[in-house]
Image: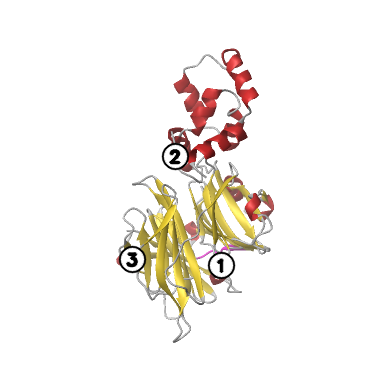
Amino acid sequence: MNNEENLEDQTSNATTDSQVARSQDSDQSILPNLPFELITEILLRLPVKSLLKFRCVSKSWLSLTFSSRFIKAHLKLSDDDTEYTHHKVILLDLSHAIVKSCSLQSFLDTPSADLATDVSLPEELVKRSFCMVGSCDGLICLEARYDLYLWNPCTRKCKKLPGPTFEGRPGWFYCVYGFGYDKSSDDYKVVAILAERSKLDGIYRVTQVRIYSISTDSWRSIGNFREGVELDKPGKLFNGKLHWVVRPCVVSINLENEMCEEFELPYYGEHGIDPALGEFEGKFAVLCHHYLTVDVWVMKEYGVKESWTKIFNVIDGDDLWYKFYSPPLFFQKKNGEVVVLHGSILMVYDLKNYPDNNPQLNRFHGYAEANMYVESLVQPWLMMD
């Protein structure tokens, strides 16, 4: 779908020709006599749901809210809101076919899956099983049996991406993915990593890496990723880079220069299993599993091994933490409590009284993945002014 077709589709969904004509005739009578700059500032502070409705008010409002400058400014205000007014928690059920969401603000006040309501899926994904690769700027990347989609649940716009092509004909294989934003080129990118099964020992190892760009709508090869490693989860976006665990290290791809980097994980004992990467209060974080215990570490200075610091641990009686595909989510409440959401596990921890208090542990039975997104007008294709 090219950009002209996208704009036509957007315009037709927002309003009909007759509505535009009526709104132009009545602009002066229904709109307040305010400078357009002031109207813009007011609109920037409204939720997406309201903005989608207000596109029918006038042609000028329609054009404004489709402009990339407005969309980026609205995104920044929403993303910087420390009250989490425009943030949503999204949950994927065990069938990997039903999605629910709720306000993050409400979720932190009353942590419960009962707050979540059904989310309308794109037609292409109805009755299909899929996983969440990642979320960035209101866009969610989904993978359904090697089909990739970029989806904005607020605007309900969805784009199916062309599939990555790999050299040769791999036998037994699987792919892991990552999704993020390249600030230097104002571009959204998806990384696909192919892991093939060795005929010698049966172990799956990375052999090829491809990267997709919205601006070019195409894939190309990345040749500097460390081959021969075993991956099984989507990349964690942090600081403009996608990260994967390759014990005893974290390997990353910088979305700006597309170079591979790595640093060491904290030492968390001989029996730690399957660390999960996250972000806590703007710091890179990792959950390290020890069967019945989960340690939470943060890297106070990104990339510096010596700055790893353990902030708390959790004693968990049934050892389910390591089984989840999605990354852990950390939230700091105003009262100092920390909320950790990982798959179907919810933990509320009071750091002020650590280590004397016990965390509150809850299970969201019936859910397999959890993620977070910010409400935005960002479209899953190249935006044009």
Q: Which residue is mark 2?
A: 76
Viewer-proximal residue among 182 and 294: 182
Residue 308, quarter of the rendered image: bottom left
Q: What x and y, as percent, mark residue 107?
A: 60, 50
Q: Amino acid at mark 1?
A: Phe
Q: Please state the extent of the stretch shown in magenta in the rendering.
A: 356-361
**SS majority, magenta:** loop
Q: Please report contact status of discs 2 and 3: CB closer than 8 Å, yes or no.
A: no
Residue visible at 51% across and 61% down in the picture: 328
Q: Which residue is mark 1?
A: 324
Q: Which residue is mark 3?
A: 223
N-terminal of the pair, mark 1 or mark 3, is 3
Q: Please report contact status of discs 1 and 2: CB closer than 8 Å, yes or no.
A: no
Q: Is residue 84 left or right of residue 248?
A: right
N-terminal of the pair, mark 1 or mark 2, is 2
Q: Amino acid at mark 2?
A: Lys
Q: What x and y, as percent, mark residue 37?
A: 44, 22
Q: Amino acid at mark 3?
A: Gly
Q: How is the image coloured?
A: secondary structure
Q: Is residue 215 visible?
A: yes
